[in-house]
Image: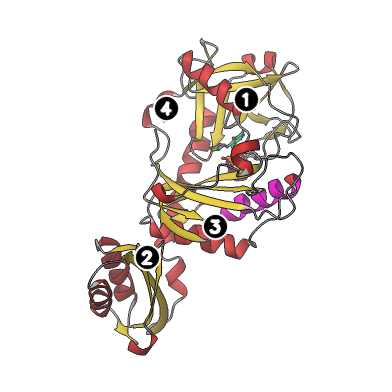
Amino acid sequence: MPAPLPLAHLNGTVIPVAEAQVSAFDRGFLFADGAYEALPVYGGRAFRLPEHLTRLARSLRELRIADPHDPATWRAHIEALIAANGGGTMTAYVQVTRGAELARDHPFPASAAPTVFACCFEWSGPPEALVRDGAAVVTQPDVRWGRCDIKSIGLTANVLARQAAVESGASEAILVRDGHALEGSSSSLLIVETGTVVTPPDGPHILAGTTRNLLRELASQLELPWLTEPISVARLRAADEIWIASTTREVLAVTRLDGAPVGDGRPGAVWKRIHEAFREHVAAFRAGATSGASAALQFPVVLPLKIIGQAGPGLRERVLRLVAEHAHVEEESVRERSSGGARYLAITVSVRIDSRADLEALYAALRASDDVVWAL
Ligand code: PDD
């Protein structure tokens, strides 16, 4: 069960997860009236972020919810939350609902502002046993609504299908509508037929998966033939290989379908190639992490710092002393403001930093400090 990391984002503010509370009249709660994204974070960097932001913007447009941010602001909020939670490897979750009004009425409220919530979850890749041995899946009737291309938070049908899979000892449900296998309850579906990768075409009953789209790029690099075609259940059962792909599963081989082995019951040869290419792609992305954001900075550099600490006696002095160990503090720039009902103190300060090593040491020290809740 993935646990949330300590800090969440709620409507522009980073706060401890336990304090992330929204109104019971939020339309997300009353009507599941909202959209979401889940994305992987490798080495502190959000993976395929532009693709996820584009899909979120599309979901919101289709739901006629005003997108609260432009892509640059979304990126800044998501990256700040990841950094606040210490970077590393995790998943990030972002949800936007139509907001709250003191009423329960189906038409759009006249004035509610969208509610934005984001948090991060512990994650270090799919379980090794599933990668090594492959996953078991079962087919389930697809009883979802007619707009599965929207990443809506209304997921009851997905939840029921997945629970049925778990109760029959499988880890995913493949959803079947009108005799065709479409996708998993929370993953994309691909099969291999005599060396050709086949995946169903996008449409109102399928979510356009970002992981699947990356697999398509990797398949083209590997010169693997790729076909977009409907997959009947008979075709699924006859496939040489079956794969499921998503943010949290990356790409897994399916080795059991409704209790029967797929191929020889072990992950197939084509899956091994694409999985290796996927892992290499992620490794290259991670390697870029260290030379990423701060690589463009020319030292010495003057930067604004924002540090949020638990309000208490001597906090300001202790934090500034810590900062001064790694950077030159511009004394006249120090400002402080209490937040979270005076539980927190936000200190902003301009600092001059002489080298990348100092910058990294400064952030490491701030993250390690018991006084500091969040630093950016
Ligand atoms: N689900 N199809 C469905 C129905 C999904 O819910 C998901 C992802 C995918 C794969 O999309 P992507 O490759 O962009 O993750 C396909 C996420 C992981 C979730 O609901 O948590």
Image quadrant, ligand 1: top right
Circle nearer the viewer, 4 or 1 = 1
The residue located at (62%, 19%) in the rendering is 239
Circle nearer the viewer, 3 or 4 = 3
Magenta region, residue range: 47-62
The residue located at (43%, 71%) in the rendering is 294
Circle nearer the viewer, 3 or 1 = 3
Q: Earlier in the sequence, mark 4 or mark 2?
A: 4
Identify which amino acid the numbered label 4 is placed on: Leu
Q: Which residue is mark 3?
A: 11
Circle nearer the viewer, 2 or 3 = 2
Q: Which residue is mark 4?
A: 130
Residue furthest to the front: 102
Identify which amino acid the numbered label 2 is placed on: Ala
In this rendering, is residue 291 above or below 358? above
The one nearer the camera, 4 or 301, is 4
Q: Which residue is mark 2?
A: 342
As measured in the structure, the alpha-carbon distance from the residue carrying label 1 to the one carrying label 2 is 42 Å
- Residue 339 position within the rendered picture, expressed as x and y whole percent measured from the top left: 41, 66
Can residue 6 be seen at all in this image of the molecule? yes
Q: Which residue is mark 1?
A: 157
The residue located at (33%, 79%) in the rendering is 355
Secondary structure state at the residue bearing disc 1? helix
